[in-house]
Amino acid sequence: MPPIIDETKCKRCGTCVDTCSEDVFYGWRKKQIPQVSYPQECAYCNGCVEECPEGAIKLRIPLPMMLLYKPTA
Ligand code: SF4
Ligand code: SF4
């Protein structure tokens, strides 16, 4: 699933929009809550989740991608 923004937590800062290299939030305008315009473009990099200062974004990684995930270390 693409990212889901909790509108009660979002402070409309745009950090997630700036973070996303895939333009998933394309069309965002300042002071608006970002909308997921291109969910199919999400690469599940988790960048928006990590950078959101309000913890307002949730991302559910698809099961096939979780199976392929190998932690570095
Ligand atoms: S980074 Fe978080 S608080 Fe800022 S616009 Fe995105 S969801 Fe909202
Ligand atoms: S997980 Fe990555 S690709 Fe997907 S919306 Fe967030 S920053 Fe963009």
Image: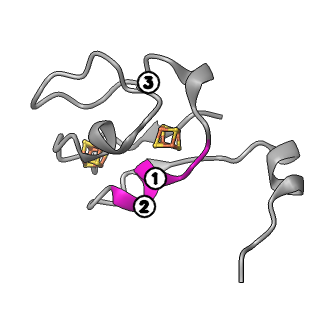
Q: Earlier in the sequence, mark 3 or mark 1?
A: 3
Which residues are the magenta region? Answer: 44-51
In the picture of the structure, the residue carrying the numbered disc 3 is 36
Magenta span: chief secondary structure: helix
Residue positioned 57% across, 47% down in the render: 59
| Residue identifier under label 1 | 47
- Quarter-of-image position of residue 52: bottom left
Secondary structure type for disc 2: helix
Q: Is mark 3 within 8 Å of ligand 2?
A: yes
- Does 69 sit left or right of 34 as displayed? right
Residue 67: x, y in percent?
89, 55
| Residues at marks 3 and 2 touching, judged by CB atoms closer than 8 Å | no
- Residue 13 sits above or below residue 38 on the image: below
Mark 2 beta carbon near ligand 2 (under 8 Å): no
What is the residue that sits farthest to the bottom in this orientation? 73
Of the 4 image quadrants, the one containing the N terminus is top right
Nearer to us in this view, 49 or 21: 21
Residue drawn where x is 28% and y is 51% of the image: 9
Q: For this view, does 61 lie left or right of residue 66?
A: left
Task: Name the N-terminal-most of marks 3 and 2.
Answer: 3
Q: Is mark 1 within 8 Å of ligand 2?
A: yes
Question: Count of labels shown?
Answer: 3
**Residue beneath disc 2:** 50
Q: Amino acid at mark 1?
A: Gly
Disc 1 to disc 2, how far (Cα)? Answer: 5 Å
